[in-house]
Image (cartoon, helix red, strand yellow):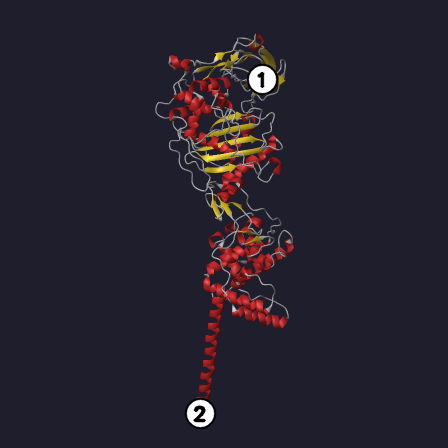
Amino acid sequence: MRLNRWLRRSAVAGGSAAALAVAGWAFFEAADRAFPPPLPEKLAASAEVVDRDGQLLRAYATPDGRWRLATTLDQVDPQFVKMLVAYEDKRFYEHAGVDYIALARAATQFASNGRIVSGGSTLSMQLARLIEPRESRSFGSKLRQIFRAIQIERRLSKADVLERYLTLAPYGGNLEGVRAASLAWFGKEPKRLGVSEAALLVALPQLPERRRPDRNPEGAQAARDRVLIRMVNAGLLGELEAGRAALEEVAAVRRPLPALAAHAADAALRSRPAESRHQLTIRRSVQEGLETVAREGARRVGPRVSVAMVLADAMTGEILGEVGSADYFDASRSGWIDMSRTLRSPGSALKPFIYGLAIEEGLVAQETLIEDRPADFAGYRPKNFDMTYQGDVTVRQALQLSLNVPAIRLLDAVGPQRLVSRFRQAGVTPTLPAGEIPGLAIGLGGVGISLRDLVQLYTGLSNGGKAKVLRDGAEAAAPAPLTNGMVLEEQAAWQVTDMLAGVRPPAGAAPRAIAYKTGTSYGNRDAWSVGYDGRHVLGVWVGRADSGSLPGISGYVTAAPILFEGFVRSSLAATPFRRPPAGAFRSAHSDLPVTLERFVSAQAGELTPAPRAVAEPAPRIVFPPDGARVELGTATTDATPLVLKLQGGRAPFRWLANGKPLVEIERRREAVWQPDGAGYSTLTVIDAAGRAASVKVFVE
């Protein structure tokens, strides 16, 4: 009888419990439908601009001023995730949002000690608090957090919960999410965290302000060490590994987040504002190198100077690095202005295309003689940069020395309209003053062109005559390819490259097998240098954003050293030039047909200057001075060459040492002599008019 009564009571009680459970579940389901958690499909995160390989170039704060970078598990070191779970929620993969064992333990400890000894919050509960911050630490708030955690786990996978937590967790100041924290505190993505760094990032979200390493390094270190001890107890770290990690100092400085390719990043956001992630064709390692070179180069030149650089793949047109200014954040240099897109005068930088067209039309070859003397082209009288004239020179020498009169002679022969037509065919339209048609002045910089357009033209020289449209991925849509793109025929492009490859590198430049050309605009406002090998083209502009004059700057002295350094710091391997196309070679002057031995301008009127202008002063050796004692190493291994300098005279010049000619005939007023022993030596120079000067020196 008693057994039957007990069974009946148990059945009634069990039925009541079951009924209560069903009712509770029904209530939860109704509440879940009525009050869904605020879980947007996509978190509001910082806009990111990444390079061609997905590496972060620049990030932008959210509208509320937070650095919050979207994070996926594959972007985070797996060891860090294991440490986080072991420290914050060791039964994370077993519960459904709430760890009732941890809650009971926390409640018991609170009742026994009168204070919170350990928390019972799961990662899901912490995520609930992050997406719906509570106003107080009341019992009702905790119940709401538990309810939200269960809701979250019903809607998200464990991986989704972790990714949202890793995106929203606070790490001090306006840093949210493990990626922003890792970049700010360690300067690296969380994929490459060390043990000490991972332990600190596990500890920070609990008390992010009180444990900020830049404000409280002692507190940050103590919190990190507690995590390391817990990891040893959990079996995730060995004692030796944890001990080594504990010896490392915590980061005491907050680093700025990356701001590379700032102008290109801004352009990407303007073109596609609705997107949160923008991928450019830029390579981060190249960009870092170029920005360093531009910043250092501008400082060397002087205040208020800016530098722009563009490096492109000539075969694809993809921009691998672009610097719009020496320092985007430097107001004194107008760093916010993108000088790679600003129209400026290119100086002599367009001359190679003039020579290429003349070669195409069979007017000249490399060794054809051409006059560099005063000339009048219907009132236009070009002068050389140094206000001197070289007389008869070869076409090769004229281009390498960047002589103005020979270039205008050739442009007059091929026609300015034809040159501009080729530029347009290559996708570049130079800007002329309103109402003007192309004239001879465009050969010396009388036209507006941007650095990007200039580099696009030079892709044709590197790419066998066919230019490629430049693109960096910031465009709203990919630019249409060129219909033709031919800026020069292949043979002419090779001939021009062969000549430019022989231009001397600037003093002190690291050796690099490139062809390059420099340019200086009127009034020393712009200094240019564009160089290329068989694959890459790099262009450099130096000047002031306000078009102010910079006395003393020039393409060769100012921009060319930056060009060579840019190639080195870009870390790109040198690519050999293209092989000469069929039938392309450099003929000696003696092998040229009669029609190519000398170029004769049909239209230019030769000027007959006043006698004072013709009678150049006789040559005079100014270094070393007569009677000087020169200390030079004379042993084979230590021998130091001596630079010889002269003034006056008419080029070319032949130098002799003790009656023996030096190897080369020089057009410049400098030469290099290697003494072959100690004692007295006589140095002599003879100019084109047969006039001579000598000095005697003693080599010690």
Displayed quadrant of residue 225: bottom right
Hey, which residue is sitting farthest front in the picture? 435
Q: Earlier in the sequence, mark 2 or mark 1?
A: 2
Asked if 41 appears above or below 416 in the picture, the reply is: below
Alpha carbon distance from label 2 to label 1: 129 Å
Name the residue at 54% across, 41% down. Answer: 262
As helix, strand or loop, the secondary structure at mark 2 comes to loop
Residue with the mark numbered 1: 645
Question: From where the camera sits, is residue 95 visible?
Answer: no
| Image quadrant containing the C terminus | top right
x and y percentages locating residue 465 in the rendered image: 40, 28
595 left or right of 229 in image? left
Residue type at numbered disc 1:
Lys
As helix, strand or loop, the secondary structure at mark 1 comes to strand
Asked if 362 appears above or below 308 in the picture, the reply is: above
Label 1: few (<14), some (14–19) or many (≥20) C-alpha neighbours in 10 Å:
some
x and y percentages locating residue 658 in the rendered image: 55, 12
Label 2: few (<14), some (14–19) or many (≥20) C-alpha neighbours in 10 Å:
few
Q: Nearer the viewer, mark 2 or mark 1?
A: 2
x and y percentages locating residue 445 in the rendered image: 51, 24
Displayed quadrant of residue 522: top right
Residue type at numbered disc 2:
Met
Q: How many marks?
A: 2
| Image quadrant containing the N terminus | bottom left
Question: From where the camera sits, is residue 108 visible?
Answer: yes
Residue with the mark numbered 2: 1
Q: Nearer the viewer, residue 200 or 469?
A: 469
Hey, which residue is sitting farthest left in the picture? 582
x and y percentages locating residue 222 in the rendered image: 62, 57
Q: Nearer the viewer, residue 639 or 27?
A: 27
